[in-house]
Amino acid sequence: MLACNNSFSPKTEASGGCYYSSHCQTIWYCRNQDRFQDNVISMKRAIIRIKASITLSGNSSSATANTSLQEFAILKSLNIKINYKHALKITEVRWFPPIGSTVKINSDGAAKGSPGHSGGGAIFRNSRGDILACFSDYFGVNDALFAELNTAMLAIDFAKRNGWNNIWLECDSSLVVDIFKGNGMVPWRLLNK
């Protein structure tokens, strides 16, 4: 069950592999106890033995776990210490408010795959940091550039319709910035916009 799922981390996969060997070993142990020692092991004791073996094996492993809730629940239920990967690089990000009557727009778009399901959203804030408006939208199956650029264009249009003529648009796509500067190619589906 666990070892067959490719999305699990090495930590959970190792525990899953141990599950199968512990299961077989416990069945063999219970059978031998009953047959040669006249000692019947209850199902509850057999399960406790399997869990203890998995816990011991999992805690002996230095493998790392993913940060998914599913893995967290599995490993916690088995009393296995969770080793997470350390962040490779931590970057401080600061949000600076706009000056005066400028409205700052933070927009972002994304696609799950290329192409894949895509969407985007934006937040509009004033110089005090108050949220004036926000939106999100689903764009269907597109690539990330389409999602980023379409979100930025929707944000500018939204600001214009609300009378916010002095805007500061911030996005994380250098391609979108190049397109607005006239140095990049606009995706053909957005040329008319």
Image: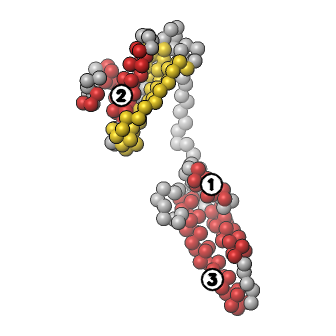
State the residue position of label 3.
Answer: 28
- Residue 19 in percent (x, y) is at 59, 69
SS at mark 2 in the image: helix
Give the Cα separation between the discs numbered 3 and 2: 62 Å
In this rendering, would 146 be left or right of 126?
A: left
- The C terminus, quarter of image: top left
Residue 116 circle label:
none
SS at mark 3 in the image: helix
- Residue 93 in percent (x, y) is at 54, 28
State the residue position of label 2.
Answer: 150
Rendered residue at 69%/68% (across/down): 52
State the residue position of label 1.
Answer: 73
As drawn, 180 above or below 17? above
| Residue 99 appears in the figure | yes
Q: Amino acid at mark 3?
A: Trp
Graded by Cα atoms within 10 Å as few (under 14), some (14 to 19) or many (20 or more), the crowding at tag 2 reads many
| Residue 60 appears in the figure | no
Mark 1 and mark 2 in contact? Answer it, CB < 8 Å.
no
Q: Quadrant of residue 190?
A: top left
- Residue 178 in percent (x, y) is at 32, 24
SS at mark 1 in the image: helix
